[in-house]
Amino acid sequence: MKESGLRGHKIAAWVIGGVIIAYCYAFINAITSASENSDQCKALESAVIAGHQIPTSVSQPGKPAAFCELGVHFPLLRTYFTVFIYGVLDRAQQDAIIESLKTAPRPNAKQILVQFFDKENWRPWSDPNSGRSGGNRGPETPIATQWIP
């Protein structure tokens, strides 16, 4: 009797382990279709920049402060784009940017989460010994958020 119970637990453990591994694989697969998503992100960034006044980025000087990245909805692993826009405080300008994103080409029709921030919270660092430098983002709270289906 104990043997069959133990055997049932072993089978359940293998099944649960297999499901966890499959889910992790699906997650990695969802976020690594990089080239297709990179091109679509660039198109969304272009839609934000074209015809709109976007301040210059602190984290990437010389580039407008508008960025895009791929996100994943849990638990079903549906992907979406997040567009981050810094320094656009006027609501009418924000609405115009939203309209531009609504009409931007989206071949696979992923949802878009648009987040507006008052400014970039960029913390630069440098290492004089190696000559390396960079930075990282500090905590940022959006001033406006909009989903585009």
Image (cartoon, rainbow, N blue to C red):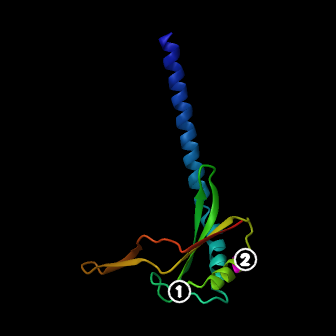
Q: Position of residue 134 (x, y in %)?
A: 38, 78
Q: Amino acid at mark 2?
A: Ala
* Label 2 residue SS: loop
Q: Position of residue 53 (x, y in %)?
A: 60, 90
Q: Position of residue 141 (x, y in %)?
A: 48, 71
| Label 1 crowd bin: few (<14), some (14–19), many (20+), radius 10 Å | some
The quadrant holding residue 130 is bottom left
Q: Seen from this angle, which residue lies furthest front?
A: 91
Residue range corresponding to the magenta coloring: 100-104
What's the residue type where badge 1 is placed? Lys
Picture disc at residue 63: 1
Q: Report the front residue among 70 and 90.
A: 90
Q: Is residue 22 left or right of residue 3?
A: right
**Please, what is the dominant secondary structure of the magenta stretch?**
helix
- Along the viewing direction, whichever of 136 and 26 lies nearer the viewer: 136
Query: Does 110 lie within the magenta span?
Result: no
User: Which numbered dot is residue 104?
Assistant: 2
**Residue 103 sits inside the magenta stretch:** yes
Res. 135 mark: none
67 or 94: which is nearer to us? 94
User: Which residue is depicted at the point 53% across and 84% down?
Assistant: 87
Identify the secondary structure beneath mark 1: loop
